[in-house]
Amino acid sequence: MLVKALLIALVQYFIDTCSWTYFDQIRRPIFIATLAGLVLGDVTTGAIIGGMLEVIYLGVVSIGGVTTTDLVFSSTFAVALSILFGYDAETAIAVAIPMGYICLLWHPIRMTIHSLFVPYKDKLIAEDKLTQFSIFHVVEPLIVHAVPAVFLFLGVYLGQDVLTYLIDHMPVLITSSVGTIAKMLPAVGLGILLNYIWDNSLAIYLILGFALSSVLGVSNIFMAIVAVFLATLDFQREKNMIDLKNLAAASASKEDEEDIF
Amino acid sequence: MGKYSIKGLKEGYSEEELGQIRSFIRRNMLQKMDYNQIRQEGFGCGWSLLKYIKWLYPGEENKQKRVEAMQRETVFYNITTAFNTLGIGLFASMEKEVKENPDMDPGIINNVKAAIIGPACGIGDSLYQVTWRVICASIAIPFALEGSILGALLYLLIFYVPMTYIFIWLGYYSYRMGSKLITNVYQSGLLPVFTKAANIVGMVMVGSLIAKQVNVNLALQIAASEEQVLSVQSAIDGIIPGLLGLLLTLGIFKAIRNKISPNVIMLAIFAVGIVATYFGIL
């Protein structure tokens, strides 16, 4: 168990670190759970849990450092529960989803720790100690991002009895309301995104996407094609308007010149 | 195409300078390493340009200029990951302009930075995190559900192969264009047009995601007569399926617009979820 607990914690650490680089979109259940399954020696279970969680979390986005659940922890935890403790995929997911919300508490703490070092980094730069700054900038996050992995390791390695007891005795109210809550929470991520892109004149496009999907059950890929098609039409129309305006302005200034002569 | 391929964009630079461009594109992959509330990706931006700035201002005699450049590049800054290099290439070429042209006001760099944050985040997040990721995940999910490792691999490849090409290309492109990029974009008047087109894609996809992902199911039942029980949910589904999810999302959007913190909204959903389940409403 020691080795397996270490391995799953390593997966957690690897993904948590990558989440804050260019490879931030590997922080998705489909990838994390499959990787965790591969490392623990049961890639099939990992992939199935990953696929199920990905469907649940498809609407969860992370914008401006705000996210609505900790995808990494719920994915690694679900795989650990299923492969190491023998729970079936559905139970593992039902337990892991609330864990993802509890782990959200860590995110503001992490950013606050990074913020604490801002004055120190400013000082290093002002004193031209660039090598020190460079090392510190990389090493500090590498240490801080290890915290969830440590918790996962302790939970899986030491907390087995406690965990199984808690899971077997979880109040029915929690198990039954988690499903309801999980289905409502994507609305927060999508609401944040709407705040960025909203324009009253574009509301009809939201309704169109909603209606095609809810009434006709159109697939995501077809939906993307429709979206790009509509956007291209609009882009061409608006571009033509600009070209016309420029043309009109150019001919107007030409007339002015003729007047002078 | 030739002129705007990566090979074409590389033309005319010395081997040394190309090495510097490669270096800041590579380092730029770690831009949001220390994402924090005060500077967001500011230090990551400075860190990406560190080697480049050292190359522009080497040695003890340039210490003052080097420190000033580093301070300029570590102010508050944020951008969508996919567009990282668009910013970094632009700032690098502007730093070069500052060095070569003493008349140029270095303050312009920070104005450009502030101007980039809004549009780049708005366009980027909806295209990168919603449209593109959802397409890739939709292709990969069926494989994963069958228990195949192909799901994860396909997701990784489909998502990152085109993305990485764009990431590298944007670095070379914005470095070559420099401050011309900004004037071109603003003078042509195409930026708002492009933003609108990108937002249309975002709106359609978000609308579709609301229908598919946000589910509010009422368990509430009304006894119409002694034998007949009317389910409120099926009555709503008869009109428009998923209407409650749409209303919930729009309500949350309104709340965020009115400066209510997303964290508060999430807590409210938890509270409502538990209470409503207890009373058998949801």
Image: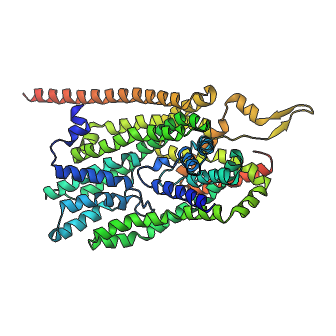
Residue drawn at 24 percent across, 50 percent down? B21
Q: Is residue B211 left or right of residue A133?
A: right
Q: Position of residue A259 (x, y in %)?
A: 11, 27
Q: Position of residue B5 (x, y in %)?
A: 25, 36
Q: Position of residue A24 (x, y in %)?
A: 46, 50
Where A143 falls versus A37 (above or below)?
Answer: below
Q: Position of residue B245 (x, y in %)?
A: 64, 40
Residue drawn at 45 percent across, 63 percent down? A142
Residue B26 seen from this side: yes
Quarter of the figure with residue B97? bottom left
Where A197 falls versus A211 (above or below)?
Answer: below
Q: Quadrant of the N terminus of chain A?
A: bottom right
Q: Quadrant of the C terminus of chain A?
A: top left
Outermost residue, left direction?
Answer: A261
Residue drawn at 23 percent across, 30 percent down? A249
Q: Is residue A224 left or right of residue B236?
A: left
Residue A199 seen from this side: no
Query: As rendered, which of B163 and B69 lies closer to the eye?
Result: B163
Query: As rendered, which of A42 and A194 lies closer to the eye?
Result: A42
